[in-house]
Image (cartoon, grey):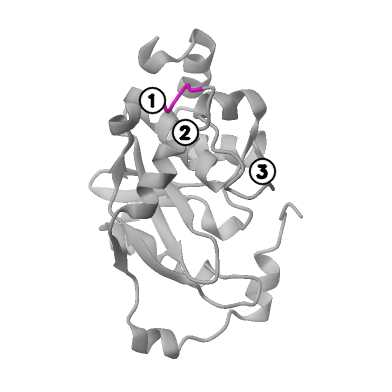
Amino acid sequence: MKFGLSREEWRLLRSLRTPGGVQHFLDHQVAYNKEPDGHTCRSPRRVMRDRVAHCMEGALFGAAALRVLGHPPLLLDLEAVRDDDHVLAIYRERGHWGSLAKSNYPSLRFREPVYRSIRELVMSYFEHYHNLEGEKTLRAYSRPVRLDRFDRIAWMTSEEDVWPVPEHLCVIAHTPTITGAMERRLNRLDDRLRQSEQTGMAK
């Protein structure tokens, strides 16, 4: 089958049908990996088998599923201060951008393809991107990265951790989301929003 996937893996990914279907699978069929992101970097094959993923692993799975559904496999890195980075699998429909992701926070997951630019898409995460102290922490974003550049390491099917992908995301240029003056005037997250963001969180 294409991309080194088995017949069963291909059928599973094809059965998801739409980006929304991929996100539903990530939300309801894949447990959140509570180990720190630095411990594992599973390929999509291993995510399908183990049914567990953290942010990076979920984004890789999402990009693989989108590829099987006819989209280019694209990742976008969101860079934070005093917080973990977040990685999105992104896609474009009718000239507008959307995204999907695995996160312990419900508001850092799916976005409908209604955003006219990458920056618009990124900024839709800004108010919900926070650390445990309630600081809004999103500061920069990368350009879209095509994962077919990593086909040589079989990123979709490898039994080894696929560290070259996150390592690449860490070293490429990022664009700031806000200025220093804006950062100094930021408010902390509203307590009610902080509580809502913990709905369904894996402790």
Q: Secondary structure at mark 3?
A: loop
Earlier along the polypeptide chain: callout 3 or callout 2? Answer: 3
Q: Residue 174: tell me if it is visible.
A: yes
The reply to whether the magenta stretch includes residue 155 is yes
On the image, the x and y values in percent for residue 34 come to 69, 48
**Residue placed at 44% from the left, 25% from the top?**
156
Give the residues in magenta: 154-158
Q: What residue did someone put label 3 on? A: 33
Q: Amino acid at mark 1?
A: Ile
Q: Secondary structure at mark 1?
A: helix
On the image, the x and y values in percent for residue 38 come to 57, 47
Q: What residue did someone put label 2 on? A: 162
The reply to whether the magenta stretch includes residue 65 is no
**Residue placed at 52% from the left, 52% from the top?**
109
Q: Is residue 15 above or below residue 196?
A: above
Q: Nearer the viewer, residue 112 or 67?
A: 67
Q: What residue did someone put label 1 on? A: 153
